[in-house]
Amino acid sequence: MRNKKLLPLLLFLTLLIVISFFSTCSLKGINPALAKDRATSYADQIRDKIAAELAKEAQVVLTATRSSTSNTTIITGTVTNVSSSVLQDLLINGMTIIDRNATGFHYSVLDIFEEQKVQITTLAPGESLEFSFTLSDINWEANRIHGVIFVQAPNSPEKEILQALYIE
């Protein structure tokens, strides 16, 4: 794996996919306990999709740092196009998550930076763009806050995340 800090995000996304699958099965009247073969087959499909995504070459490199005071956090970073083609219609966004110190659902999403997202019209090969998110009324360390910054292709059929970075 290229970036070990992506592991918590991948595990979180896998969990969301599995929960979504079982929720859909329940809504359609299928009892997941009776559909063990389907669940196993679906789990295999998910593993295959994750393996395929991990095998892809990165189109962007994302870096970010965090500085915090007792009530404000600033996350600054850079996204660089490392592909050989022009990338269009991208978003830089992020979210804060809390470490609940609990078994099961270890993390909970607190906020998605919808109001501060950065839109990128085009990013040429080798070009970099700097960004910054200012989060008010957050005591990062005292409240066990973590974050994820990501670059998304929102107009792609699956709203693909091109790169993500875990912020401790």
Image (tube, grey):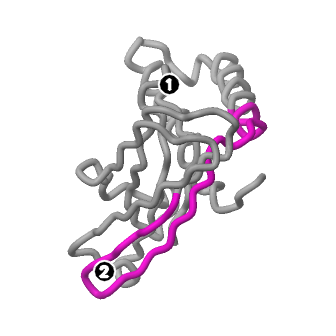
Residue 67 included in the magenta stretch of the image: yes
* Circle 1 or circle 2, nearest the eye: 1
Residue 20 in sight: yes
Q: Is residue 78 left or right of residue 28?
A: right
Q: Secondary structure at mark 2?
A: loop
Residue name at image x 29 percent, y 68 percent = 134
Residue name at image x 21 percent, y 75 percent = 137
- Say which residue label 1 marks: 158
The residue range painted magenta reads 50-78
Q: Is tag 1's residue or tag 2's residue first in the polypeptide sequence?
A: 2
Determine whether 98 is above or below 59 in the image.
below
Residue 77 included in the magenta stretch of the image: yes
- Say which residue label 2 marks: 139
Mark 2 surroundings: few (<14), some (14-19) or many (≥20) residues within 10 A: some
Q: Position of residue 15 (x, y in %)?
A: 55, 42
Q: Secondary structure at mark 1?
A: loop
Asked if the residue at tag 2 contacts the one at tag 1, i.e. Cβ–Cβ closer than 8 Å, the answer is: no
